[in-house]
Amino acid sequence: LWGNGSILGFRITNARLNGIECRGTSSVIANNIISGNNWAIYADLGASPLIINNVLTKNSAGIVCERGSSPIITNNIIAENNDGIGSYNGSTPRIDYNNWWNRNVNFDHCSPGPHDIFVDPQFVSTSTENYHLQPTSPCIDTGTSTGAPANDIDGDTRPQDADYDMGADEYKVTNIIINPIRVPADYPTIQQGIDACPENGTVTVEAGTYSEEIWLTKKITLIGIGMPTITGAHNHNVY
């Protein structure tokens, strides 16, 4: 990016070098999923882009700032990269309201903001590159409204709940309530399906044998399809 444009709502993957490069610009980078690149975003030559509500994952590094760059970095999920962010040669990134969950170093020559978090973002499925949020994700309602786009990557309105979410997806409660959680299609174990299910939701369990102890601690409906078996590997099968 050499001009002050915007990149909104793209999946950017497998570049030979970097996913997005900003050089001396004040661009907006929002609602993107940037994965499998060298660096997801590279800010250089005094660039000051607004980097907001993106998912940066499975890159060598999430964000690299060089030569006096000062990006605003807000509401992003920077997860499962080798490193999070590096700031060099007089750069001053402004960082807050992000989730950092990387393999090696989250911050090199810069510091987190007071509202940043450091936990598993709980994507629906990283193996299938489904970067929507599970209902138990810590990224729900932990973002900020400042600068946030009006819609998410799916076109859903922000916010859906009390506050704004981190990442490209704004968690939509109605989708989860209408569509049941399926075991093992969505979660391999019954307990994982129960834990992910919201109050008054439904978990369906396909035929098979499940060797586990079940804790049913909230108001949900658990439906067996084809008579699945919960085998007695513990003192009790269902609590």
Image (cartoon, rainbow, N blue to C red):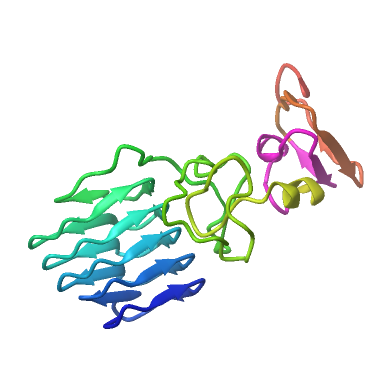
> Is residue 105 at all visible to an observer of this figure?
no
Number of numbered discs: 0
Q: Quadrant of the C terminus?
A: top right
Q: Residue furthest right?
A: 226
Q: Position of residue 132 (x, y in %)?
A: 58, 56
> Is residue 227 at all visible to an observer of this figure?
yes
Q: Quadrant of residue 87?
A: bottom left
- Magenta range is 183-210
Residue drawn at x 7%, y 63% as measured from the top left: 89
Indicate yes or no whether the magenta region holds residue 51. no
Is residue 88 depicted above or below 178 in this figure?
A: below
1 displayed left or right of 183: left
Q: Residue furthest top?
A: 235
Indicate yes or no whether the magenta region holds residue 200. yes
Q: Quadrant of the N terminus?
A: bottom left
Q: Position of residue 13 (x, y in %)?
A: 43, 75
Residue drawn at x 58%, y 63% as measured from the top left: 128
